[in-house]
Image: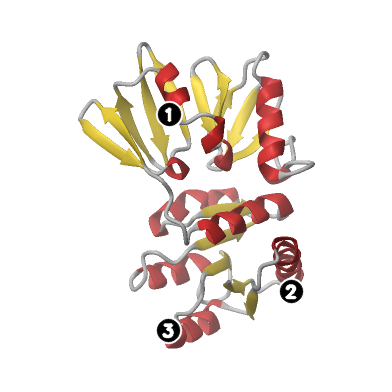
Amino acid sequence: MRIAVCDDEEAPGRLIIRYLREWAAAQGQIVEITEFPDGESLFFRWEDEQNFDLMILDIEMGTLSGMELARRIRQQDEELPILFITGYESYMAQGYEVAAIQYLLKPLSREKLFAVLSRVQRREKPEEKLTFSGEEGVLVLAPSRIWYAEAQGHRSVLFTAGESWRLRHSMTELVKMLGERKGFVKCHRSYLVNLRHISAITRTEIVMDDLTRLPVSRGSLRAVNQAFVENYGVGGRSRNGPDGAL
């Protein structure tokens, strides 16, 4: 796997590279890491070779920001996985414009970065898509695109990044279609949530990566915590807020 890391701050860049090497060692994966001090040098290299499997970009950088760099890349490549790492929650909504695979907030979560790397590693094997019966017709989606589902009477609504679809399925049917085997868990009688997109869990709610907050019922809290820890490994992630910042 060839990874480009672009962060104009030395300490965060070193931490990213350290985590990348730890993940590679744990996975037995050969990872070629190329570090860039600014967006201009990375874009110059990418235009010449275009051989990266993943770009990890800070957003606030010198003349060419990580967001503008991503926009330039998307003009030529719509598939390259781009991961943003930032210290500012205000930038998160902009990531959808360039189809970033995820946002991670500083200070960087080791477990969350590992989860993103594993997702990129699995991209070589196409994800099985599911077919849903929508109120406006058939809907085909990969489970990873779904953030959560909400029951509304005898039907339900699926939510992805910035979009929603009204379905003819009940919550019971969605649990059978998605369920823990595909990385989903019920956090409330009205909500089914994708573990991939959870940023934090408190005693009363779940915080998603886009800062959406969903309720957690008392009876579901233990199962949600257990599923979350199993998904991210021993220790999981911070329970105090998005990447430790609630």
Instruction: Give the residue at the far right of this rendering.
Output: 235
Name which residue type carries label 3.
Glu
State the quadrant of the N terminus.
bottom right
Q: Measured from the top left, where is residue 12 in percent x and y?
A: 73, 66
Name which residue type carries label 1.
Met
Q: Measured from the top left, where is residue 28 in percent x and y?
A: 70, 66
Q: Residues within 10 Å of mark 3 (few under 14, many from 20)?
A: few
Q: Are marks 3 and 1 in contact (CB under 8 Å)?
A: no
* Of 112 and 181, the residue lying toward us: 181
Q: Which mark is residue 177?
A: 1
State the quadrant of the C terminus.
top right
**In what element is the residue under mark 2?**
helix
What residue would you read off at disc 2?
Answer: 10
Name the residue located 48 percent from the left edge and 58 percent from the top edge: 123
Quarter residue 219 falls in: top right
Name which residue type carries label 2.
Glu
When the figure is inspected, residue 48 is found, relative to residue 114, above or below; the finding is below
